[in-house]
Image (tube, rainbow, N blue to C red):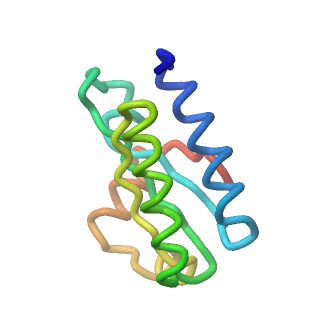
Amino acid sequence: MTNYTADNILDLFRSQIQLRLGARLKKVVLFGSQARGEASPESDYDCLAVCDEITSELRDAIDELAGELLFEHNAVFSIFPISEAAYHNRAFDPLLMNARREGRVLYG
């Protein structure tokens, strides 16, 4: 296993999620301690994956990617898929409020 920095891991994640979800992926937002620059070595990567619609196939692809990142790089990704409509319409959702306030857009 190669030692990767947080930026290397995020670059890998960004390229892999784009490859796997293609045009369905509209935006990816990193939030939490990694986005704030307060991460410890044990911190996970909290991400919103904004997609045109959420299907079981899409959830499976996201879960598979998270599993591979954990197994191959010991990086824990908590990826929250959300539809584009919900992302724009759920203004008072605490998770979305947090992601909007402190988030770092990785894609889109």
Q: Is residue 25 above or below residue 79?
A: below
| Residue 71 placement, left or right of 39 | right
Say which residue appears at 35% left-offset and 52% top-offset: 78
Say which residue appears at 47% left-offset and 59% top-offset: 64
Q: Is residue 20 above or below residue 88?
A: above
List x then y, in percent, for residue 19: 71, 55
List x then y, in percent, for residue 35: 42, 36
List x then y, in percent, for residue 93: 31, 72
Q: Is residue 12 above or below residue 24?
A: above
Residue sitting at the far top: 3
Say which residue appears at 30% left-offset and 25% top-offset: 38
Front-most of 58 and 105? 58
Q: Tell me which corner region of the image, top left, top right, bottom left or bottom right, holds residue 45.
A: top left
Front-most of 81 and 36? 81
Residue sitting at the far right: 23
List x then y, in percent, for residue 73: 43, 30
Q: Is residue 5 above or below residue 98?
A: above
| Residue 61 placement, left or right of 107 | left
Front-most of 75 and 79? 75
Q: How many marks?
A: 0
Q: Tell me which corner region of the image, top left, top right, bottom left or bottom right, holds residue 75.
A: top left
Viewport quadrant of the C terminus:
bottom right
| Residue 87 placement, left or right of 95 | right
Say which residue appears at 61% left-offset and 36% top-offset: 12
